[in-house]
Amino acid sequence: MTKRLSRSGLPVKRKKQVNGVIMGNSKFSRRLIFFVSILILVTGCTGIATPAFTAEPPTAVVTEPAVMPKPVTTEIEVQPGAEGAGDSLYPNLGNGGYDVQHYTLDLTVHDVATSALSGNTIIEARATQNLSSFNLDFVGFEITSLTVNGQPGEFERTRQELTVTPIRPLAEGESFTVEVQYGGSPGEMDSMAIQIQTGWITFDGGSFVLSEPDGAASFYPVNDHPLDKATYTFRVTVPEPFEVGANGILTETIEGEGTTTFVFDANDPMASYLATINIDEFDIETSQSENGVPIRNYFPTGSPEEMRRHFERQGEMIDHFSELFGAYPFEVYGALVIDFEFGAALETQTLSIFSKAMIDGGAEGSESVVAHELAHQWFGDSVSLADWSDIWLNESFATYSQALWAEHTQGRAALDEWVKGVYGFVLENRESMSPPGEPPANRLFNAGVYYWGALALHALRLEMGDEAFFEILKTYHERFAEGNARTADFIGVAEEVSGKELSAFFDSWLYSEDLAPIPGLGLEAN
Ligand code: TRP
Ligand code: ZN
């Protein structure tokens, strides 16, 4: 998907570079550089050059023109695509050299108890450089067939890297299709970032998918970095009586012999970690927000009314956040509750998923989590990270949105109480947190990127005044919707809208080891 890349580079951070830049020269020397002759046939009448990659000279001969232009043979360089997307924390995530437009995941689950499945993933992409080979991220399974543009491709697997060498190189700008067929059961992923199992997870009674930041490769071959967003089609076949809940809109349900195929289309660009497929038996409840955003919630069959009640105000939340941040960015929303306790929730695009444990924290606590995942649809899903080190752009915004919901429902005093409480919490637990702008790779989701960063947003609001602050949020969302943003982009918008120079402010809130004061509320560290 064409990326709306940041206008400015990375913010200047007091930060050690992790392993340098993946695409840097050190790797260059290890790479084979291929030179392939290409024949540029200059067509006599139009003068349009038609480059064609071929390993051998083409055999077709143009016989007609009286004056035959001499074929020009040029050497052009083709290289392997990078094995990473250039992320500063996770250099191996994602890949370089191409841009995916669309994934079609056709999965047939033979046995829900083991998640034994046959998969066929079709990737429609465009080369962004001349490619002798390219990588996908993919873990586990046995690959039974792999083609590029319908022709068998060679492939090699090392850890999560699947290296594909097409029969002929791909030219920069060329569209191509990769089809990978595979079978087996998804294995357990060990996340580099978080102490929680990610990827496709099988539990007693069903399965679910949570992939932030590095689980997507456990069930489909993918360019696994949010920089390469794409649209998706899911065709998932399950034995009766199971059902499937996935991102986007259910467009078809096909009855087979003892099976049902569920087809979902996710029509807005989506980061790979947000793709989710959940299998269980569900009660589906549909409604819509007052302003007309369709909602469908998936609850495990027989789940009690008290649990469903936590989601009752989602419509109101959608409309309220739409007012604060700009119109809800997708065509549908909803929640899916997983009948398994894993103590987390994830903002999977258009269909956030919740473990039961996340919504049994009493009415208020549960509603707050519901607000958090919803707010991520704007911040994280619609506007996605360009680098995982900027995770505060997701988590602090979603966390502060919990406070905004409290303010909306209980008034400004409730917001102030929330901020004071969180300030105390951060002070007390400072040792277990990183400053919001510099999370370590192995504790990406530490409390600093949630709470400390949420305080930064409130401090910004007090510094700017409400009008400018919400104008900043709206402008930031509008400008980077469907694309990616970096911390510097947010700072840029904040400075542009407020007319203030804010680098010292953001330095003190995002990169300093000390918690900055919030004078407006009389809060300071000592
Ligand atoms: N982004 C999630 C949240 O809203 C937290 C999270 C990160 C997560 N990685 C995860 C949850 C993996 C479940 C699984 O807070
Ligand atoms: Zn979150």
Image (spheres, helix red, strand yellow):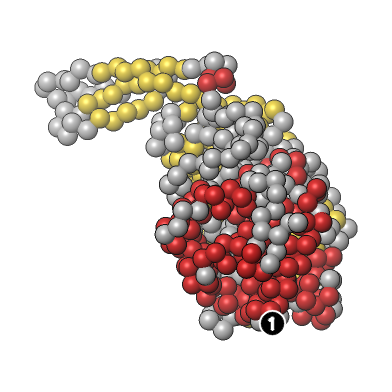
* Occupied quadrant, residue 438: top right
* Occupied quadrant, residue 128: top left
* Occupied quadrant, residue 350: bottom right
Say which element carries label 1: helix
| Residue at mark 1: C-beta within 8 A of ligand 2 | no
Residue found at x 46% / y 47%: 6
x then y, percent, for residue 4: 45, 50
Tell which of 514 and 300 is nearer to you.
514
Whether residue 382 sits left or right of residue 203 in the image: it is left
Vertical order, 59 against 3 (above or below): above
Amino acid carrying mark 1 in the image: Gln
Tell which of 287 and 325 is nearer to you.
325
x then y, percent, for residue 33: 48, 17
Whether residue 22 sits left or right of residue 446 in the image: it is left
Residue found at x 81% / y 43%: 188
Vertical order, 279 against 158 (above or below): below
- In the displayed orientation, state which residue is furthest to the right: 204
x then y, percent, for residue 81: 52, 29
Instruction: Look at the image and tell me whether residue 122 can be seen.
Output: no
x then y, percent, for residue 255: 68, 65
Tell which of 295 and 402 is nearer to you.
402
Instruction: Look at the image and tell me whether residue 66 can be seen.
Output: yes
